[in-house]
Image: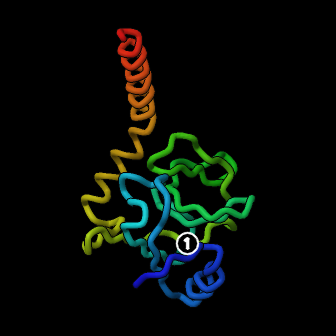
Amino acid sequence: MNKQVSVDDVIDLMIEKLNAGGKVTFTPRGTSMLPMLRDGQDIVILEKPKGRLHLFDVALYKRDNGQYVLHRVNDFDSDGCYVMCGDNQFSLEHGIRDDQIIAVMTAFFRKGKSYTPRSLIYRIYFNFWGYTRLLRRALGYTAGKSRALFNKRNKSDF
C-alpha cells in the first residue's frame, strides 16, 4: 500500500538523496502536466541536474512563495533564467533561477512502461507539445467560445 504524503513532508529527504547522487521516485499530483503525467497515476524518476537545464526538460523547482512545482522548461529569459510552464497550462512563469531547481526528470512510468527523454516517442511528444502551445491555446479559446455560444442558444430555445 502506498501512502500519500505532501512534498513538503519529504522534501528534505529527497534533497539529501539527490545530493548523495541518488534518484528519487514519486507520483505527482495535479493536472498541470497532462496529458504526459496523469494525476496520481504515473511515476516520475528525478535526479540532480548535471549542469543547466535544456529546452523542454521537466524539472522540480521551488517557487519563491515556497510551493514545489514540476513543470517543463519552455524558454529562457534574457538574464538566463528559465521560463517554465505545465503542459496543460498556457501562462508562462518567468524568472526561475538555477538555485530554485531541485531535480530534473530522467524518466517516467505509465502502466509499467518506462519513457525517458531520449526515447523517440517522448521526443516526438515534447517537440509537438512544446512548439504548438500557442496554437493549442487559440484552439481551446475558440472551442470554449463556440460551446458558450451553442449553450446560450440552446437555453434560449426553451
Picture layout, residue 75 above or below residue 151:
below
Q: Foreground residue, 40 or 99? A: 40
Return the residue at label 1.
103
Picture layout, residue 116 above or below residue 147:
below
Residue at (45%, 79%) from the top-left corner? Answer: 25
Is residue 82 toward the left or the right of residue 79 in the image? left
Q: Residue furthest right?
A: 65
- Which of the image's four quarters has the N terminus? bottom left
Q: Residue furthest bottom?
A: 20
Q: Position of residue 127 (x, y in %)?
A: 35, 49
Badge 1: few (under 14), some or many (20 or more) residues near its Cα, within 10 Å? many
Residue at (42%, 66%) from the top-left corner? Answer: 40
Number of numbered discs overlaid on the protein picture: 1
**Mark 1: which secondary structure?**
strand
Q: Foreground residue, 132 or 70? A: 70
Residue at (33%, 45%) from the top-left corner? Answer: 128
Asked which quadrant contains residue 154, the reply is top left
Residue type, mark 1 in image: Ala
Q: Position of residue 131 (x, y in %)?
A: 40, 41
Picture layout, residue 78 above or below residue 31:
above
- Which of the image's four quarters has the C terminus? top left
